[in-house]
Structures are given as C-alpha cells and as structure tokens.
Image (tube, rainbow, N blue to C red):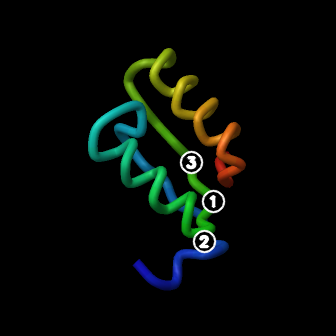
Amino acid sequence: MAGVEGRVTLITGAGRGIGHATANLLASRGAHVMCVARSQQELEKTGLEFSVADLGTI
C-alpha cells in the first residue's frame, strides 16, 4: 500500500474487524484516518489505541 502518507482517508466500520485493521494499517503508513463505526464505545476504543500508538487520526 504505497503512497498513502499524508493522505486523508475515511474508514467505515473502524470499530472492529476489517475496518479496524484497515484503519490501523493506513494510520501506521502515515495516512490521516477518519474513523466511523456503529458503536461509539468501539470507536472510542479504536481512537484510544491509535493515540497510544501515536498514529494520525481525525
């Protein structure tokens, strides 16, 4: 997945599963990731994980 550094991405289903893994991968490669999920609790957990890992999220 080349060329994502600095790009803004929108990931649906980011609270778990494939969406969570995709958001994590893109953020770790330098993308700015906007996460959307059905569950606010899962979304907050994802945001916390990204903050701890110092990944770029919006």
Image position of 49 (left or right of 26): right
Pointer 2 residue: 7
> Outermost residue toward the top?
41
Q: Residues within 10 Å of mark 3 (few under 14, many from 20)?
A: some
Amino acid type at mark 3: Met
| Front residue of this view, candidates 58 and 20 | 20
Q: Are marks 1 and 3 in contact (CB under 8 Å)?
A: yes
The span from disc 2 to disc 1 (Cα, nearest Å) is 6 Å
Q: Which residue is mark 3?
A: 34
Local packing at callout 2 (Cα closer than 10 Å; few below 14, some 14-19, many 20+) is: few
The residue lying toward the viewer, choosing from 49 and 13, is 49
Chain-order first, disc 2 or disc 1: 2
User: From what the image shows, is residue 33 above or below residue 45?
Assistant: below
The quadrant in which residue 7 appears is bottom right
Mark 1 falls on what kind of element? Answer: strand
Label 1: which residue? 32
Rendered location of residue 54, percent (x, y):
71, 49
Q: CA distance from mark 1 to mark 3?
A: 7 Å
